[in-house]
Amino acid sequence: MRIEEVCRLLGLPGEVVDHYLGKGIVELYPPQEAAVRSGLFEGKSLLLASPTASGKTLIAELLALHVALVRGGRTLYLVPLRALAWEKAEGFKELFGAVGLRVGISTGDFDRVDPALGSYDLLVLTNEKADSILRHRPSWFFKGLEAVVVDEVHLLADPYRGPTLEVLLSALRKEKPGLQLLALSATVSNPEEIASWLGAEALVSDFRPVPLKKGVFFQDGIVFPGEGARPVGDEGKRDPLMALTLESLREGGQVLIFVSTRRSTQAVARRLARRVRDLLTEEEKRELQRLAAEIEGDVEERTSLSVELAKRVVDGVAFHHAGLPSRHRRLVEEAFRGRLLKALCTTTTLAAGVNLPARRVVIRDVRRYDPPYGSSYIPALEYHQMAGRAGRPGLDPYGEAILIAKDREELEELLSRYVLAPPEEIRSQLSQEGALLFHLLGAIAARYIRTLTDIPGFFSLTLFARQFGPEELGTILRRGLEYLEAEGFVEVAGERIRPTRFGSLTAALYVHPVSAMILREGLGEVGRRAERPPFSFLHLIAATPDMELVRLSSKDIPELEVLAEEAESAGIFLVDVPGFGERGYRRFLAEVKTAQVLANWIEEKTEEELYIDFGVGPGDLHRLVETADWLLYAAGRFAELFGLRLPELSRLRRRVRYGVKEELLPLVELKGIGRVRARVLYDAGFTSPGKIAKASPEEIAKLPHFGVKIAENLVREAREAVRAFFGPT
Ligand SMILES: Nc1ncnc2c1ncn2[C@@H]1O[C@H](COP(=O)(O)OP(=O)(O)OP(=O)(O)O)[C@@H](O)[C@H]1O
Ligand SMILES: [Mg+2]
């Protein structure tokens, strides 16, 4: 079916046709056509289970356009990860803008709900963000909401993030039974079961527009099942990864390499760079130099991690992982997309949903170290997602996904475990006790659950109940409710269950009940302490399960033990410290390390120092600061609830946000002034907006890290701030 015909059939305007034709999309792929004919556009729910790169996004776009332009409603688009949310929202803007529709996105700030979100025709949210919004039950949420797209719906099987999606979908369907769902995934092996849970029809297809061959490198060639081996050239024997990369580059392709650790992404990139640079043209070398300069120059603070990235980029190779600043990750993705970078080594940060021109994907590591369990094989589902990054439409004529085997035994293992195996079936992960407790309180606070009988009622809507029977969760739920009652989150009177103010606040802040208890315990101690330095609060938030802890390495331990001992004898910890040798002791040291990183950050240690001393990259730091900001805010809200006056908490929060000593706070809150410039200003005697307001821009422009433009804006802003404060004179 041609795109004109589709649009005519669906009542979509010519701009939509022009947009797609401009992208080279002329004709629908068979699964897309099947989706159009499936009743989706008459309001039926659908699970579209079709291979990677088969164009599932386009169906979601057409649905959202149809909902907005024909049905006069709104669509919600759910994704697993923030990075994917941004990529998707960016991708939608041009098309929706062309027909006068608005695309919105929101991914952070769990307890603030912006009512403007209700005005977007297409709203992109992470699952967590949507779940947190729903807990507040804002009146706009369901108003006009006609359809929900659930991208990467196989996330249901993820032990950490699956339960949130599962509860979110259950709650959406409970609140609005007629709501239309469009679930998308390339890796669902039990589509009928998942579809029937969603009240949807399953549309299954094995069509892939670009052929994808999956094989295993062994000895000196690639074994493709059913075809035998294909030689890769001499150096394959010594260095398979190098041989696989160079071969594909020589044929004009680009290579994406998945490894299991960040360190490996960097090491592999370094090794490949030496040979890849020989394949670059002079023009490419010049452009890569420019890109390298941009990477080195665009951040306020430079770290050796970014310097290393810039060095690799010069040779046409890059690495990609969550330790890099997000700006640099984006630059690398763009340059790879622009075919300037030839080989990209990555962890799973690029495993799902993204479109990159990789003719060959090499998956070097299929085992992952997972403390405390040791190393284990990754699921076949993950393998298929990574493999599916190869051979994307419009970018390459074919794709190849290759694993590497050391010996014959491993060859057999890799073939049977991955290449020839379907992804695992999607199984609910909801019985995980911590997750269930979190969602039980959430459901009570959101008033989905008002009575004892509502509990089995609500949870009977979950995938878990469908797969394992409605009684299975009973015991855990009963235990959970007792716990919530005993700890003062909920009150049970006869049949009725009500959240307490503590319980409601916990749910609204979107923190785990255990986090709330730890914060409550710690805040209760504050009054008993003679001293309460920032470290006390930083450790307190690090002790909650909502903090993503900085990784502990064995060489950190001796130093951290000394630090922890000193801190304990000074009475600095606000919550109990586990004894040596106890199960929680390693975790406790990781908490201390995390608090230590934050404490160094607000003492203005440079990002480079934090990277070298703690192994915390700028990307990690950014996430850490964001989480700490949220938890300190939560601590402040709890303190308020308990009637505690702790002004130091909000000051600490601002220091964490900017990474500064207290004296810089008035300066960093000026526009365009980060912590580096604020320090320069302060040390030059410009210690307050008032002093800056009296300065001349020329004076400030001479300082390091300043230029004329920044100085002029700064002085103007400082003057305005002072005037606003004192009123017109
Ligand atoms: N009918 C079509 N003709 C040509 N190109 C198309 C067509 N439909 C989609 N594409 C292009 O195919 C590419 C892959 O599409 P998309 O990202 O939607 O894949 P997907 O099915 O979501 O894959 P994954 O499961 O990996 O997320 C996109 O670049 C898209 O523009
Ligand atoms: Mg997709």
Image (cartoon, helix red, strand yellow):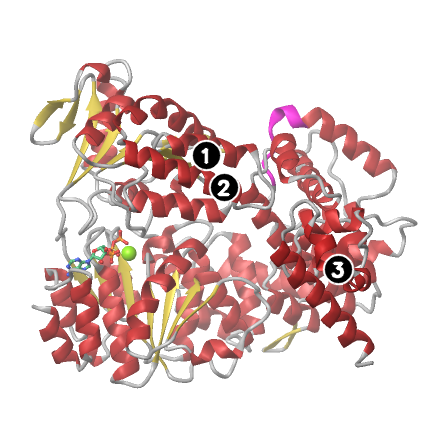
Give the residue number, with chain letter if any, for mark 3: 696
Label 3 SS: loop
| First along the sequence among labels 3 and 1 | 1
| Segment tinted magenta in the rendering | 550-556
Q: Quadrant of residue 153?
A: bottom left
Tags 3 and 1 in contact by the CB under 8 Å rule?
A: no
Mark 2 vs mark 3: in front: 3
- Image location (x, y in percent) of residue 483: 64, 60
As measured in the structure, the alpha-carbon distance from the residue carrying label 2 to the one carrying label 1 is 9 Å
- Image location (x, y in percent) of residue 393: 18, 51
Residue 309, numbered label: 1
Residue 420 belongs to the span the image colors magenta:
no
Give the total number of marks visible in the rendering.
3
Left or right relative to 404: residue 724: right
Left or right relative to 199: residue 630: right
Left or right relative to 311: residue 352: left
Mark 3 vs mark 1: in front: 3
Give the residue displayed 69% in from the left and 29% down from the top: 581
